[in-house]
Amino acid sequence: MYLTGFADEAAQDLATQIKATKEIGWSRISARGVNGANIHELPESDFNAVADEFDAAGITIPEFGSLIGNWGKKITTDFDITLAEIDRAIPRMQRLGSKLIRIMSYAQEPWGDDQQEAERFRRLREIHARFADAGLQAIHENCMNWGGFSAEHTLRLVEEVPGLKLVFDTANPVFQLDRSKSEPFPWQDPLEFYQKVKEHVVHVHIKDCTNPPAGETEPTEYTLPGAGQGKVKEILTELKNDGYDGGLAIEPHVATVFHATDGQEPDWQQCYDSYVEYGKATNALLEALAWKTE
């Protein structure tokens, strides 16, 4: 098992992302954003400079956090946008030595509306195939997308898209209603969700939070790992007992949330400090479980 993290939550510039990673004691980053742009959206010259900087610092990139099919794109979005993202992502993953790319199943439509499942499955089969043909693995995250409606929805995706694997996020169930159950829909249970999908999980995002206020969709608070309702300790215990040997990537959201819409610039010193604190808290959790990392 190895540790990594979305260091763009610590800083926008790459040098500071690397500094935060090394302060925690790690040598891996889940590449997502640099200077406010996703890795697959950077100009070619900027990307080449980023790749060289990773190499010089001895940082490896096990996971590529793409925008492909994410919560910001509806299923009616032109599929050519997705195909262009794939075409840019593949050579950049190959340059960075990344084998896993996080994808989603497009934004949820309001519950009760047509979710266009057939089109989602068609697109994800194409997305998966293009990465597989390049020797890369697409991994679906349970977020505010179709697969995030419930564990059963995620399992349906795996069934409909042969070869698709999963990245499980510990906190995302906390602020999503379980649409596989009867009304009034309860909040999803993170441990129950994990237990249902775990045979397909090859990567894990460590995040924690508390249930949203009534009528809201954002958590009341993002917390340090183990301090919220994400059942992080229980899931880590089960992962260890199951012999999990993949990655654990921190995605704190404590100081900044990447899909927030208030437009306010975060306090980047606070972001840096909280990211390092989060990484060290994760180290402490694993030490308490006597779980050694690579």
Image (cartoon, rainbow, N blue to C red):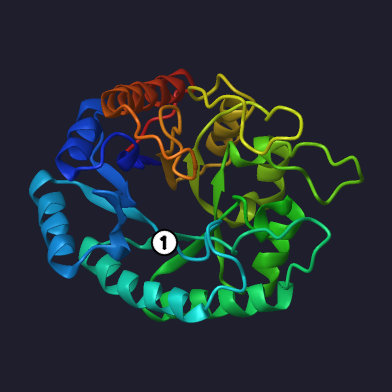
Decide which of 98, 37 is in the foreground and name it.
37
Amino acid type, mark 1: Ile
Image quadrant holding the N terminus, namely top left
Which quadrant of the figure has residue 118? bottom right
Give the residue at x 80% y 64%.
Answer: 113
In the picture of the structure, the residue carrying the numbered disc 1 is 101
Give the residue at x 60% y 64%.
Answer: 105
Decide which of 268, 58 is in the foreground and name it.
268
**Extreme residue in the front direction:** 263
Label 1 crowd (10 A; few <14 / some 14-19 / many >=20): many
Which quadrant of the figure has residue 93? bottom left
Q: Is residue 129 above or below residue 265?
A: below
Label 1 residue SS: strand
Q: Position of residue 253 (x, y in %)?
A: 45, 33
**Extreme residue in the left direction:** 56
Q: Is residue 78 above or below residue 19?
A: below
Decide which of 272, 264 is in the foreground and name it.
264
Q: How many marks?
A: 1
Q: Position of residue 217 (x, y in %)?
A: 67, 39
User: Would residue 54 be visible to someone looking at this image?
Assistant: yes
Q: Is residue 158 above or below residue 148?
A: below
Q: Is residue 262 above or below residue 220?
A: below
Q: Is residue 201 left or right of residue 193?
A: left
Which quadrant of the figure has residue 77? bottom right
Image quadrant holding the C terminus, namely top left
Give the residue at x 62% y 25%.
Answer: 220
Q: Position of residue 106 (x, y in %)?
A: 59, 64
User: Would residue 132 be visible to someone looking at this image?
Assistant: no
Q: Position of residue 135 (x, y in %)?
A: 37, 74
Q: Is residue 163 left or right of residue 156?
A: left
